[in-house]
């Protein structure tokens, strides 16, 4: 092994390490962004019942496309399939008009 070989391998290793560290930082920031988006989404969902009627018609029309992947109306009954991650809404209580329980 020569010094030139050692230096080249060391440079490659440092470059790779720096790339991995940058990738890790990027993933950490993306994870934080996802958490922030989730919190904002929960805030919107919590306030939706009171605020939805005051929204412009265009927003009201877009909302089902955001939440639902499929909806059918047959025999006087509406059936819906929620998009991910909204499928968790199926488990929310529906009676009483209150807010869903908080964890």
Image (spheres, grey):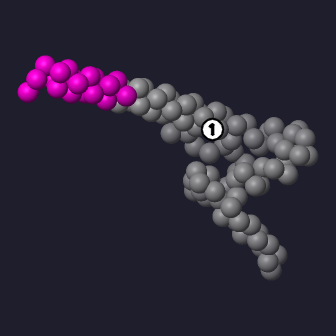
Residue occupying the point 44% across, 33% down: 27
Residue 83, position as x, y percentages in the image: 63, 57
Task: Tell me: residue 101, above or below residue 20.
Answer: below
Residue occupying the point 77% across, 55% down: 64
Task: Tell me: residue 70, above or below residue 99.
Answer: below
Residue 86, position as x, y percentages in the image: 62, 52
Q: Main secondary structure of the magenta part?
A: helix
Furthest-left residue in this view: 1
Residue 63, position as x, y percentages in the image: 78, 49
Q: Is residue 17 visible?
A: no
Q: Does the stretch in magenta take in 10?
A: yes
Q: Residues within 10 Å of mark 1 (few under 14, many from 20)?
A: few
Q: Is residue 42 visible?
A: yes
For disc 1, the marked residue is: 42
Residue numbers of the magenta segment: 1-19
Q: Is residue 80 left or right of residue 38?
A: right
Q: Could you say which quadrant of the image residue 43 lies in?
A: top right
Q: Does the stretch in magenta take in 87?
A: no
Q: Is residue 41 left or right of residue 2?
A: right
Residue 40, position as x, y percentages in the image: 64, 33
Residue occupying the point 67% across, 55% down: 94
Residue occupying the point 75% across, 41% down: 48
Which residue is nearer to you in this view: 73 or 68? 68
């Amino acid at each position: 092994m020569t010094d030139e070989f050692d230096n080249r391998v060391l440079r490659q290793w440092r470059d790779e390490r720096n790339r991995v560290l940058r990738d890790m930082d990027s993933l950490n920031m993306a994870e934080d962004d996802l958490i922030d988006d989730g919190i904002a989404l929960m805030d919107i969902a919590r306030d939706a019942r009171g605020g939805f009627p005051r929204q412009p018609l265009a927003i009201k029309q877009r909302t089902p496309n955001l939440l639902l992947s499929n909806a059918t109306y047959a025999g006087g009954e509406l059936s819906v399939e929620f998009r991910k991650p909204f499928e968790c809404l199926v488990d929310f209580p529906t009676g009483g008009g209150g807010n869903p329980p908080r964890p």
